[in-house]
Image: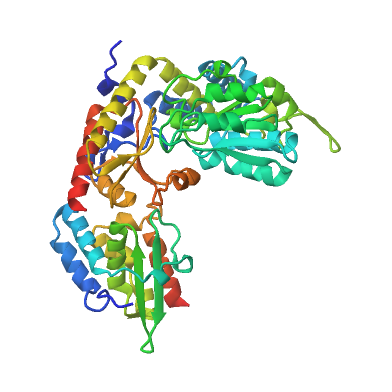
Amino acid sequence: MTHPFGTEITDTEIRALFAAAQGWEARYKQLIKLARQLPPMADESRVDANAIHGCESQAWLVGECGQDGRWQFHCDSDARIVKGLMAVVLAALSNKTSAEIAAFDMDAYFEELQLLSHLSPSRGNGLRAVVSAIKAKAGS
Amino acid sequence: MIVDIRVLRRDFPTLAQIVNGHPLVYLDNAATTQKPQPVLDALNHYYRDTNANVHRASHALSGQATRAFEQAREKVARFIHAPSPSEIIWTRGTTEAINLVAFGFGRHFLQQDDEILVSTSEHHANIVPWQQVAAATGAVLKIIPLSGSAELDLAAAERLITPRTRLLAIGHVSNALGQVNPVAELIAMAKAVGAVTLVDGAQAVGHFPVDVQALGCDFYAFSGHKMFAPTGIGVLYGKTEWLEKMPPWQTGGEMIKTVSLEHTTFAEPPFKFEAGTPNIAGAIALGAAVDYLQGLDRAALQRHEHGLLTQLLNGLTAMDDIRVIGRPQAGSVSFVMDEVHPQDLATLLDMQGIAVRTGHHCAMPLMQALGLKNGTVRASLAFYNTEDDVAALLAGIDKARELL
């Protein structure tokens, strides 16, 4: 489950990257770049049990809580922009405690990144479903 | 008559919007069409000036509302050349219209081993109700396959239509691929063995004139919102002989003749199938949409739309990495880009103000048959689209390719 998001790349870096991105093209190039930095999930994890529903694209999520009380999450999608958005979410929520995850304001974060439309329930890409699934896992 | 589409577009206020910083290029007409001002005015006028329930009260407003509501039924009957307005049943849309037939005809007149025939390219609304009928009655659902070019295999259909076929339920135009099915031929084949026929006309009525008598179908279903009218109103045309035989599928007010606490007798069609307060405003506005369409030169609009389709297909086929699926003839064009997920392409088009649809388009069996795991990108046209819209889509695809 190793990837740089939540450890080397946190929400602070993501905020800086998007603050520097001028215009929608730069923001989407950034998302596609982030998608490349998120390694694919192992085939054995890309199964129905880990599938996130509510996605026009296919999406998967796995997560486990370490002995240090920090959650490690990994996501994957067959659509690049969705995968980039997932990396943005992982930067904010992976390697965090349940309390930190519960306290994180995803709407404000996405609004700052000018990506808020992707969190809309009608969007169909299921990003909101991914965020809810992470929060549910960390809350249980 | 030369139609000036730029002038005609002024009738559709929604089209004048800026989306994501760009003038809206609306190419999701197969999902729903935009509404012209006369349709918006009809909705507003009903609620502002004549709001009253229909067929009930003896007061003036109710009389006006009832007249407008029944006039709309007459307009729709003329629009599809139905012999009588009493063969026009208001429904919520195509889906409810098909479900009405599935209940009233399927569950009551089909039995074990009767065969229901649909095609691989059907919208889910013309598959799932028949699966449910088959499960409830023991009838068998048979599927007309696709030929090599993703068109409906007419030779296979001929083999599948047998004396056991009791119902043929077929889409007039495929919502996913924009292919026009040979419905007249199929209906003739089905009638030759005594089968009942239903046509899902959701993707047809907004694009070209439909004549139910020329088709010879028993039932024809369509939605208002795909032909420039509001959502939540649709039509089932049914031949009187079936509407008389079929039991009502929902019961309650409006659809009765007499009720005692022991026994109820039902009203005549179409009222027998219209329980409860109907979507009065929607029906009147659908009548307004019919008036609007019939006030235009539809043949000219059809030529214009066909020109756009040709421009779009030429543009797409000139791109090495784009594959057009099937042979689009009306409305929708489905395509995929090599190595690119349809949703990525659609997201980047949306950022340029271009509205298209991605995914399986509620036709999962079709997508499976075509081996399209991620579905397609679908651009769907209406007569108010322009050459500039098509050019914007083609340029938008080039821009998306650069970013991806």
Q: Is residue B14 left or right of residue B291?
A: left
Q: Would you place residue B124 above or below residue B381 in this image?
A: below
User: Residue B89's image quarter?
Assistant: top right
Position of residue B198 measured from the top left corner of the image (x, y, whole percent): 60, 29
Furthest-right residue in view?
Answer: B262
Q: Quadrant of the N terminus of chain B?
A: top left
- Residue at 24% of width from left, 75% of height from top? A4
In front of the other: B234 or B49 = B234
Colour mode of the rendering:
rainbow
Q: Position of residue A78 (x, y in %)?
A: 34, 59
Q: Is residue B390 visible?
A: yes
Q: Position of residue B398 (x, y in %)?
A: 19, 43
Q: How many marks?
A: 0
Q: Residue furthest bottom?
A: A67
Say which of B264 and B199 sits in front: B199
B380 is higher (above) or lower (below) than B242: below
